[in-house]
Amino acid sequence: MDSKKSRRIRHRNHQWVWILNKGSRIRLYRNQGKNDSPDAIYASGYFFTAGPLVRQLRAAGVSVPIIGQEGYDSQKFIEIAGPNAEGVIITTSLDRDSSMQITQDFIKGFEEKAEYPTDIVAASAHTAVLVLADALGRASDDSASALRDSIASANVSASTGQISFNQLREVQKDVQIQVVKDGMWRHYAVISDPVLLAPPAE
């Protein structure tokens, strides 16, 4: 198998298999995942490729946890993967069970307007608009440099949590872990360690 497209990773005496799904190669990766007997499978991708991948892995008898990222973060992934989506875990930025009122108001408002469950793309757009609106309100004048500096000093509560930036304008925020439970994305955990999550500072 092409080493650039599938790599085996060992971490703390556990074997992990990193599977990158690339359309026609899903079957090859599926068989590789089963034969390697991994502790878990990490598969990066968007919902339209992740859904079929998860279905095929489960159909092949692969029962270990499947871990993805925010490309899965859509109700469409759950619709495509069907019952096989249950238990899939992802890293993302939207916590559907957040205690933040702004998050719950966004989720409710979005779903009333769109008539389908929200996803990370909508939440990210909502966050970006709030950051920009906050910066416009605080900028010293209407110049591009003033707006840039205002964005850099943002500390905004949004649907994806508390948003701020460091001196390189790298975002600083928690990482949410969601899991599919009863056909919906639900809270699983949160990573909030500021040292672990610290973005590059120089």
Image (spheres, helix red, strand yellow):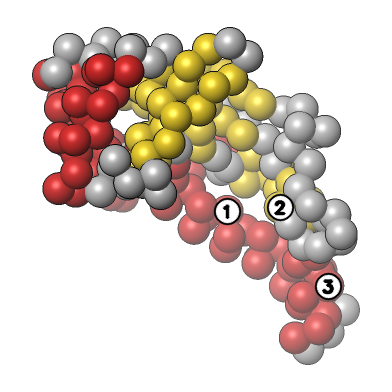
Pick out the residue farthest to the bottom: 143
Q: Tell me if 59 is positioned left or right of 193 in this view.
A: left
Which residue is depicted at the point 54% across and 22% down? 10
Q: Which residue is the site of mark 3?
A: 149
- 184 or 43: nearer the viewer: 43
- The image quadrant where one finds the N terminus is top left
Q: Nearer the viewer, residue 76 or 158?
A: 76
Task: Find residue 158 and report its horizontal and vertical position in percent.
Answer: 62, 46
Q: Secondary structure at mark 2?
A: strand
Say which quarter of the image contains residue 8.
top left
Element type at mark 3: helix
Query: Quick one: 113 or 25, which is closer to the camera?
Result: 25
Residue under circle 2? Answer: 171
- Residue 155 makes an appearance in the image: yes
Position of residue 40 in the picture relative to residue 158 (left or right) = left
* Label 3, label 1: how far apart the Cα atoms are: 18 Å
- Residue 144 lies in quadrant: bottom right
Determine the CA span between mark 1 and mark 2. 12 Å
- N-terminal-most mark, 3 or 2: 3
Q: Residue at coordinates 41% horizontally, 26% vertically from top-left?
A: 17
Number of residues whose C-alpha sits closer than 10 Å to that of mark 2, classed few (under 14), some (14–19) or many (20 or more): some
- Residue 156 visible in the displayed image: no
Residue 71: percent from the left, percent from the top?
38, 44
Q: Amino acid at mark 3?
A: Asp
The residue pinned by badge 1 equals 127
Horizontally, residue 117 falls left or right of residue 154, namely left
